[in-house]
Image: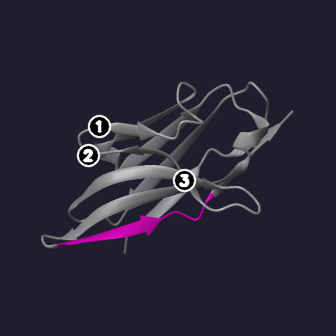
Amino acid sequence: QVQLVESGGGLVQAGGSLRLSCAASGITLYINAMGWYRQAPGSQRELVATISSSDTTNYADSVKGRFTISRDNAKNTVYLQMNSLKPEDTAVYYCNADVQVAVWRRKDYWGQGTQVTVSS
């Protein structure tokens, strides 16, 4: 059974940094794209950043230049380095993985979420 476990969230002051990690277990073939999404209270879940299996990255305009996504394929882990944090970055951050579960089948998985709170 595939599981995604996030860590690294917490409370930080504006201008500070946090690093999120998401480790996938139960992978029998491989992971395609991985990504981070976030959801603030009263808002819809939104894309933060994604990274393909060939390390092509994509960022939301609101985080470009401040956040960096990376992955370690040997560890089935994706990271999100968040710098220059702003109060508007406060949200629950979710990890996502597009997993190849069979030669002809892909499936989406989500982590349980980790809270990031940025105080002003």
Which residue is more in the foreground, 11 or 14?
14
Q: Verify whether residue 46 appears in magenta.
A: no
Compared with residue 60, is residue 4 higher up or lower down, i.e. above or below? below
| Residue occupying the point 14% across, 73% down | 104
Direction from residue 29 to residue 111 in the image, left or right: right
- Main secondary structure of the magenta stretch: strand
Q: Residues within 10 Å of mark 2 (few under 14, many from 20)?
A: some
x and y percentages locating residue 45 in the rendered image: 60, 60
For mark 2, give the secondary structure. Answer: loop
Which mark sits nearer the N-terminus, 3 or 2? 3
Q: Which residue in the structure is indicated by mark 3?
A: 37
| Residue interval drawn in magenta | 105-113
Q: Are marks 1 and 2 in contact (CB under 8 Å)?
A: yes
Q: Are marks 1 and 3 in contact (CB under 8 Å)?
A: no
User: Which residue of the protein is positioned furthest toward the front in this rendering?
Assistant: 61
| Residue occupying the point 28% across, 56% down | 31
> What is the total number of numbered labels drawn onto the structure image?
3
Q: Which residue in the structure is indicated by mark 1?
A: 55
